[in-house]
Image (cartoon, grey):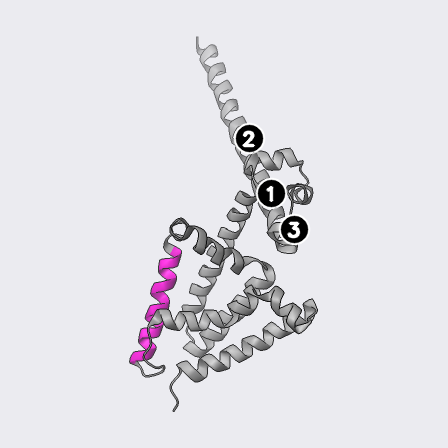
Amino acid sequence: MFNTLALNNKGFYICIVEIQEMKKVELNTEEKIKAAARKVFMLKGYNGATSRDIAKEAGLNVALTNYYFRKKERLFKIIYMDVVHEFLDETIGILNKPIDLKKKIRLILERVLETTKRNPEFFLFFYSEIKNSSEEFLNELGHVKDRMREKWNEQIQKSIKEKVIRKIDPLAALTIVMGQLQFPIIASKMLKELGEFTEKGYADFLENQKEHAVEMINNYLFLKG
């Protein structure tokens, strides 16, 4: 009787280990697909990327990729929701730095450009989701958007009280700061054609726009003297 119970217990233990190992394999496979998809979407964008491209980058077959994520659209959304959270977390990190507001605004604009370099379709995705499924999208952002808003509002209200900046609604100030670079990013195809830019030329153009944006924001928002 004892030997039978010991055998059963041992068998049950082996079963648990096997299940845990299977879960690890599944997790590793999912992460491998996500990492591959992020790289492919960054290089080719949503329309240019295919499930076959992602599977090839991950070293898997297309059927297995589709098994885990079903549709390219769903995978794209998962990847870019991760990027949204990263961007907001990084912005909160900047707002928490013990530096003045001018420096924080410059760092935020630099972060906008860096995010665009890493994920060229990020802001297109962001505004498309807000337009097409705003309530669902904002719910998916969870507490990170609330922390971002609270921290920004706190900074603006403190700066107004200390007479560092003009009296302005915090949301209006956020729109001014974030909007300065996001238009040339979203309208990149049109502006590249109008300016006859190479990719390198347009990257330089955006860097110059960042400096213009910093100057315009500082001149409008901050009080003189």
Image location (x, y in percent) of residue 208 = 59, 77
Task: Determine the CA span between mark 3 and mark 2.
Answer: 33 Å
Q: Residue placed farthest to the top in the image? A: 1
Rendered-image quadrant of the C terminus: bottom left
Image location (x, y in percent) of residue 86 = 49, 57
The mark lying in front, picked from 1 and 2, is 1
Q: In the depicted view, which residue is nearer to us: 35 or 78?
A: 78
Q: Amino acid at mark 1?
A: Ile
Residue designated by label 3: 48
Question: Which residue is rendered at x = 55% and y = 64% of the image?
Answer: 186
* 152 within the magenta span: yes
Rendered-image quadrant of the N terminus: top left
Labels 1 & 2 near each other (Cβ < 8 A): no
- The image shows residue 66, relative to residue 133, as above or below, that is above
Image location (x, y in percent) of residue 45 = 62, 54
Numbered circle sitting on residue 33: 1
Q: Amino acid at mark 2?
A: Met
Image quarter for residue 62?
A: top right
Numbered circle sitting on residue 170: none
Left or right of residue 114: residue 142: left
